[in-house]
Image: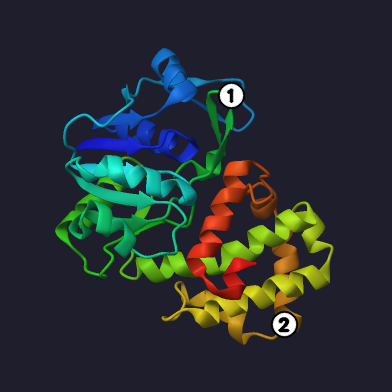
């Protein structure tokens, strides 16, 4: 397949390297200093804190070049609007892989509704200069497979082809027929969590404040109650139905777990803060806007 990976941060770089290694015709789109680094060194990968850095010579471009079988968009929520117009005249299906609670309609209104697919990446890592550092157990192979779906819930030939393309490249992926509800559920949980972690100064500090955890849970419940559809996965429904006295200790344990501590929840960067703000706006209402 001829693929364009739009966004050369951690997730875009990891995915481009893996798909390139699987033999696909991959171009990684980058700008500014990142573009210069990639042209000079390729995608540079390191596992954890290892001093060993692997170079993957993924072709890099500054602008889309012709048409593609599939365009993978790895940008933050607040950056999507700036991406849509450049993609409107580029041929190819577009899979948006990021936090997104606004549904497919505003995306399709710009680039064409028939082109849009939605998903969420489940890999993780950090940038160390121009080196992408990934956790070995998370390098696109976490137990939670990457959900990908058609906005209308159909299982189409192109969806099956995309899922198989990822799997053949060693990236765990699955077709999710309720991908829009999945993304909205994730946002309903992520926004109060991210806001509370930042206000407390980190996940462990939040865990040590039961009152703040109760307030966070209250906002999660309000967000989930405001959804037009049941939560996906269904397990998130427990946040609405189980007693607060049971859920607060569970959430406090989660906040002290390695998964929370190393998740980037307390990332203070302006980009992370702007993304959280935009995601809250997409949820709407007082529960999502706080």
Residue underneath mark 1: 129
Provide residue 173's location: percent of width, then percent of height: 35, 53
Q: Is residue 131 left or right of residue 120?
A: right
At x 72%, y 82%, the residue is: 244
**Which quadrant of the structure image shows residue 286?**
bottom right
Q: Nearer the viewer, residue 258 or 42?
A: 42
Residue 17 appears in the rendering:
yes
Q: Is residue 207 above or below residue 123?
A: below
Residue 73 appears in the rendering:
no
Q: Nearer the viewer, residue 104 or 9?
A: 104
**Mark nearer the viewer, 1 or 2:** 1
Task: Residue lying at the far right in this picture: please name it.
Answer: 208
Q: Is residue 127 left or right of residue 180?
A: right
Query: Mark number for residue 153?
Result: none
Labels 1 and 2 touching (C-beta < 8 A): no
Q: Is residue 83 above or below residue 149?
A: above
Q: Secondary structure at mark 2?
A: helix
């Amino acid at each position: 397949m001829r693929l364009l990976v739009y966004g050369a941060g951690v997730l875009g770089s990891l995915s481009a390297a893996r798909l390139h290694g699987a033999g696909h015709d991959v171009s990684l789109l980058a700008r500014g200093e990142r573009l210069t680094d990639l042209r000079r060194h390729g995608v540079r990968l390191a596992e954890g804190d290892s001093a060993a850095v692997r170079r993957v010579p993924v072709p890099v471009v500054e602008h889309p070049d012709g048409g593609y079988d599939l365009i993978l968009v790895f940008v933050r929520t607040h950056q999507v609007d700036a991406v849509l117009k450049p993609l409107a005249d580029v041929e190819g299906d577009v899979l948006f892989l990021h936090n997104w609670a606004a549904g497919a309609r505003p995306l399709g209104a710009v680039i064409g509704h028939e082109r849009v697919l939605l998903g969420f990446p489940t890999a993780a890592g950090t940038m160390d200069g121009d080196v992408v550092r990934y956790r070995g157990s998370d390098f696109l192979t976490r137990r939670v497979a990457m959900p990908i779906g058609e906005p209308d819930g159909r299982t189409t030939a192109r969806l099956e082809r995309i899922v198989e393309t990822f799997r053949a490249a060693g990236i765990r992926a699955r077709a999710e027929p309720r991908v829009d509800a999945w993304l909205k559920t994730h946002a309903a949980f992520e926004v109060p969590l991210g806001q509370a972690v930042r206000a407390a100064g980190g996940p462990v500090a939040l865990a040590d404040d039961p009152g703040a955890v109760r307030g966070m849970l209250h906002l999660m419940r309000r967000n989930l109650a405001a959804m037009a559809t049941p939560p996906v996965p269904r397990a998130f429904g427990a946040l609405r139905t189980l007693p607060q006295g049971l859920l607060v200790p569970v959430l406090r344990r989660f906040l002290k777990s390695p998964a929370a501590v190393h998740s980037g929840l307390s990332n203070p960067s302006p980009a992370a803060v702007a993304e959280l703000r935009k995601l809250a706006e997409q949820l709407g209402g007082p529960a999502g806007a706080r």
